Amino acid sequence: MESVFEIIAEPNRRAILSLLVSSQQSVGEIERQLRMPQPTVSKHLRVLREAGFVESTVDAQRRLYRLKPQPFQEVDAWLAQFRRFWSAHVDALERHLDRVQQSTATKTKKKTK
Amino acid sequence: MESVFEIIAEPNRRAILSLLVSSQQSVGEIERQLRMPQPTVSKHLRVLREAGFVESTVDAQRRLYRLKPQPFQEVDAWLAQFRRFWSAHVDALERHLDRVQQSTATKTKKKTK
DNA sequence: CTTTTATATTCCTTGACAGGTATATGCGTA
DNA sequence: TACGCATATACCTGTCAAGGAATATAAAAG
């Protein structure tokens, strides 16, 4: 489990990370919200912690987990090399279209081949 | 192998993708540049193709592979939910700093606890 | 100090995937 | 047609990681 990419390859881990975006959570809260057995949660949290995605503080018997930014930035850095490429593909952007932009009405240049 | 994240979890596949950023390449070219056995390259290319990361065109006996943008955008979309979080971490921004944007200077509210 | 609550860890099993080797397919060329 | 180059596929094997069940640790509550 060396790279950040292997860490986020696991769906449950991604779910945990998404959950922690809103605010820090205890293991029990994660367990309940994601309907996931407690050992599973703990084990994934361990992986995430060792990879630097999260950190925890002690609150009585609870542990509160929160996100840490660095590994995300690593992913982002890797992704960066492809950004210039995909923003060149205008048609691809069209397909995606969750962007409320478009309708620039430049001639629909189709260069599929 | 359902998600894009599992696809890019494999180091050799990431190497192939990075190689294709510059331009399209044949299987043999990839094989030589990455010093990777040919079946390995072909197998990874298959995975990448089925996941929509690359597409190929035929050039005589060669197949030329090139990148496709959509899966990268998926990764980017997932990453997006964490961006606002990590950009709150100013020190993290300093480390990254390839973005020449923003600086709206909204109050740097630190609400860690 | 016993019990309960919260979390972590251990052990075991299972499945998936990557690599290696061999072989198949397909195209060009003599 | 036969051969050679380029790529794909099939088969086998080892590894590793995820999940389940049980148990350990640790702190709070009674």
Image (tube, coloured by chain):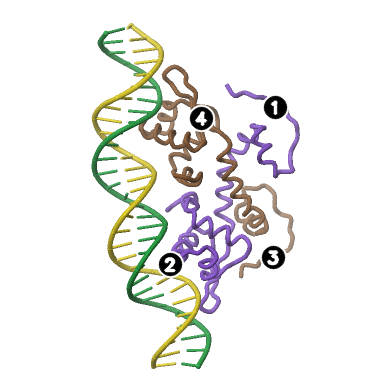
Chain colours: A brown, B purple, C green, D yellow
Please, what secondary structure does the residue beneath circle 4 have? strand
Residue B71, x across and y down, in percent: 54, 54
> What residue is disc 1 on?
B108
Q: CA distance from mark 3 to mark 2?
A: 37 Å
Tell whether A43 sits left or right of B70. Answer: left
Q: Which mark is residue A109?
A: 3
Looking at the image, do the residues carrying marks 3 and 2 touch, with CB atoms under 8 Å apart?
no
- What is the chain letter for disc 4? A
Measured Cα–Cα span from mark 3 to mark 4: 49 Å
Question: Which chain is indicated by disc 1?
Answer: B
Q: Chain of mark 2?
A: B
Give the image location of residue B34, x and y in percent: 52, 63
Residue at which label 4 appears: A55
Q: Secondary structure at mark 3?
A: loop
Does label 2 or label 1 sit earlier along the sequence? 2
Q: Is residue A14 left or right of residue D30?
A: right
Seen at 51% across and 78% down, the residue is: B61
How far apart are the alpha carbons under marks 4 and 2?
41 Å
Type of amino acid under label 1: Thr
Type of amino acid at the residue the image marks with label 2 = Pro
Between D7 and A90, the one lying in front of the other is D7
